[in-house]
Image: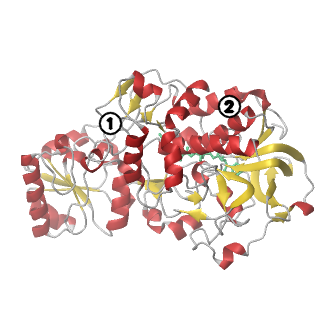
Amino acid sequence: MSTHETVSRRTFITAVGATGVALGLSSLATGCAPQGSDESQALSNTSADDVAWTDEAEVVVVGLGAAGAAAAVAALEEGATVIALEAADQAGGTTALSGGLIYMGGGTSVQQRLGIEDTPENFKAYLTKAVGPSADTELLDIFCTSSPDLCAWCIDHGMTFDGDADETSHIVETPEGISLMYSGNERAADYASIATPAPRGHAPSGGAASIIDSLLQSAGAGLDIRFGTALSELVTDDSGAVVGVKAEGPNGPVAVRAGKGVILATGAFTNNDEIVENCRPEALSCRGRTAGPLDRGDGMIAAQKVGAAVRSTSRMTVGAHVYMYEGLPKGALLNHRGQRMLAEDWYGSFIGRTILENTLSGCFVIIDQTMYDEAMGCPYAAGLTNITSADSIEALAEKSGLNADRTAESIARYNEFCRTGVDEDFGKSPEYLIPIEQGPFYAVSVLPQDFSAFFTLGGLKIDGSARVINLDGEPINGLYAAGRCSCGIFGEYAGSGSSIADGLTFGRIAGQTAATR
Ligand SMILES: Cc1cc2nc3c(=O)[nH]c(=O)nc-3n(C[C@H](O)[C@H](O)[C@H](O)COP(=O)(O)OP(=O)(O)OC[C@H]3O[C@@H](n4cnc5c(N)ncnc54)[C@H](O)[C@@H]3O)c2cc1C
């Protein structure tokens, strides 16, 4: 495919293609450095005077996952000319590998049609707790208040959500015919006490592929896409404003001038070992990392070289989806000290984070025979590989390297909660409070090496207009970012669907802002 070909949309869909494109970027060892470090500020970039431009558009979008596709469509609809650079040989990125859920609430048309009550305030109350105190409240506010409009925008741009609501199960896979489901901790007691639970995981018909397909169909022939073309660096003028990009295309280097702005949407840095090691070293002990091959942080690194600030780079989703294995959420999850530390029916990335941050060695879900049989009968049972059994809780603890007395105490206390129906320690839902008393008993290992790290949440610091912020707290002229190359609303991960929703929200804003600059 020619680097200059304007592509028909139908060819883009689905899985990420690893292109083998050699990128000119190396990771910044300062990925987690304190803001304002001398090392970050000393990094050089190319000045506009030294560049022989090969192409020009008003807006240049880098990366075509959910965030980049939304940015490109929004910029085109504001009347800008747009060139999109995509390193892979098709659009989609990690978005195309995902479950395709979009977390929207506050009274979307889909929620209304299905009789679900929600308001932007209720939505924000849940999210504020879920993403935690380090989240950007300005972005969170925009995200929540604009969510019903985002849903309408998705529908206007070809996505359909015409199935039913599933108000009972936990998210693992989207069941057939379901358009709306719970996908986080909405029903957990700690959360339900501050926000009325409402399902917000919107599943478009056709799944993740339909998100990219719908948006690129909406963009139409006006979107000039250069596949196999990887950003290598940003170009600035004398004032420090970003005025274009340099990239490696299939036929050699290109330099694209951006009359109005460059929007970075290159995704997470999950597969960049150097930055992950600096920012979230515990994640390296996970069984694997599930992410697109080009999740290397290219956009974040390039922007740091022109002085961009980053935030929350130590945040990463780790998928300890205990509830995937029927029976397991009825057990008691104990840390290496033999103590419970969470509600076992929590959303997987909440559990993963808690384990990653608190558990150095053995960490197990303790279950009895009935729960074990249930877990072994579930479709994902093959994923449970490290299981010990014994006839008594004390013997099981000893075999598993846990303190026998403390383990027995923890299980006795837990069983008492099961009998009263109230988990006084962590507020686990009553439906999962089943006493662990019919031996033999089993200890199912849930250490980081037993599950996968998914995607990094931190990245470029942006403001409510999706402008990238520099180390002095000022916007960098001409530079925008959205999706997982930015930090967006995170903090911690709020639940399935919130990454794509964040990318769509701020991608759309980036496109509109850059085009109307
Ligand atoms: C198994 C799995 C399931 C998931 N399920 C969900 C879910 O249901 N809902 C949800 O919200 N989130 C989910 N996520 C997370 C979510 O998919 C991603 O966080 C989100 O899609 C990222 O979107 P993005 O647009 O920022 O990046 P991406 O979709 O990764 O797009 C980035 C694009 O940039 C391109 N690129 C990278 N470097 C360069 C470069 N140098 N030059 C040019 N182009 C470049 C890439 O090729 C890619 O096409 C899931 C993740 C995984 C791994």
Q: Position of residue 498 (x, y in %)?
A: 47, 44
Most distant residue in the bottom direction: 38
Determine whether the residue tagged by mark 2 lies in a helix, strand or loop.
Answer: helix
Residue underneath mark 2: 216
Asked if residue 178 shows in the view, the reply is no
Residue underneath mark 1: 379
Which of the pair 106/451 is nearer the observer? 106
In the rendering, which numbered label is found on residue 399?
none
Asked if residue 183 shows in the view, the reply is yes
Vertical arrangement, residue 20 with respect to residue 16, above or below: below
Which of the pair 143/305 is nearer the observer? 143
* Cα distance between the residues tagged 2 and 1: 35 Å
Q: Position of residue 483 (x, y in %)?
A: 59, 48
Query: Residue drawn 43% across and 43% down?
Result: 496
Q: Position of residue 278 (x, y in %)?
A: 54, 70
**Amino acid carrying mark 1 in the image:** Pro
CB at disc 1 and ligand 1 closer than 8 Å: no
